[in-house]
Image: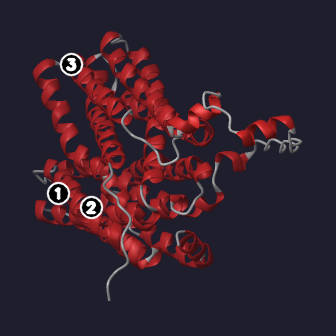
Amino acid sequence: MVDEEQPKLWTRSFIMVTFANFFLFCGFGMLPSLLPLHFRDLGAPEALIGFVAGVYTVACVIMRPLVGVAIDRWGRKGVLGIGLLIMCAASIMFALLPVLGLVLVIRFIQGLGWGMANTASPTLASDIIPQKRFGEGMSWFTQGNAIASVLAPGISLTVYYSFGAEVSVLVSACFFALAFVCSRFVKTPDEPKAEVAAASSGNVPATAGEDAAKAHPTPKAPEAPKARVNLKTFFEQRSVLPACIMFFVTACYGAMTSFVPVMSEFRGIEGVQWFFVIEALSVVASRPFMGKLVDRKGYRPTAIVGMTGMCLSMATLSLAGSFWVLALAAIFNGVGYATCYATFQTMAVAGIEKKRRGSATATFYVGYDSGMGLGAICAGLLAGAAGYAVMYRVFALLPLLALVILFLNADKVAAREQARR
């Protein structure tokens, strides 16, 4: 049997928005490893260094719902461009204003810019990607995230140790500028044609029919009442379930990224830097395949694969005593995270009408950001009270709890699958 013809995925706009997203994550990926060192160089105590990440997360969570509404009402490209310019300007200010208090303020402002850019970018991509190939397309689009997570920290630390923090943050600003340039070449499917724009501005000659219409104007229909602004304006209800499930996934991911280096040092495991390389390469290798699997099999089969990978990753980390066990955990985590991300981002956004996709994307990322932040905090408290082994074993239960929630809401999952058809 011959498969029906697939809609085209690799258009110029899709390629340019993918490159814009890659450069965005390159600039962003340089900062988490760099700014704590920069903050320390400015004389910050250890207890205060954590606030660099804290104020940033707070800004992101505050900004996401507001940005979702702005994207839906005023367009994706404009919000993306403003967010990228804020990120770029903030990186430049890190170099120009090396003062402890100002670094925290600038990082908060940069968090607002990240909330704008990182919400608008996937929303713009979701407009371009054909719905029948959404899982595959979004997997390729987010490859830049994984590749940047390998390249950016190395670039950041190499430049820092060679030239200092000021040059490093300026390099990150250059990446944000490149992302801005790429985003300007993206054209969404619903952008007005030149002749339509001309007609709306009155530059197209009127036809005889239009003259007659002017002579006998049709009474205007009464204007629809303006929609009330309430909680539903800022959050897309149909995206709440995938956002909640992604909360558990990123809670595990936050615990992994925050404490694998410290745990490895405590247990005497060498080569921990390769853990993140192996994890990122596993994401890169599995994302396209898992995206196609989402398109063909639906959400529940791929959710089982993803959650199993996350569960095995946490359980393996609890037992890690050598580099090779650590590497196995990295592979489990990379495949599990890539599968969950492809599954639940598709569930959150695919099939949502364009006027609500910004809010849908924002809702998804509120769950994503909250899981990362709270996961790291709770992991630290639990590790301090009971040790790393117990902490990771407790976190291994979270993916199982997420699967229970998913299957208890089978009707909502079926509705989201039906909406894509």
Residue 310 in picture, x, y percent from top left = 34, 67
> Within 10 angstroms of label 2, few (less than 14), some, or many (20 or more) residues?
many
Amino acid carrying mark 2 in the image: Gly
Residue 351 in picture, x, y percent from top left = 55, 63
Residue 356 in picture, x, y percent from top left = 61, 51
Dots 1, 3 in contact, CB < 8 A? no
> Within 10 angstroms of label 1, few (less than 14), some, or many (20 or more) residues?
many
> Within 10 angstroms of label 3, few (less than 14), some, or many (20 or more) residues?
some
Residue 394 in picture, x, y percent from top left = 41, 65
Amino acid carrying mark 1 in the image: Ile
Residue 183 in view in this figure? yes
Mark 3 highlights which residue? 167
Numbered badge on residue 278: 1
Residue 55 in view in this figure? no
Q: Quadrant of the N terminus?
A: bottom left
Q: Nearer the viewer, residue 99 or 363?
A: 363
Query: Is label 1 in a helix, a strand or a loop?
Result: helix
Dots 2, 1 in contact, CB < 8 A? yes
Numbered badge on residue 334: 2
Of labels 2 and 1, earlier in sequence is 1
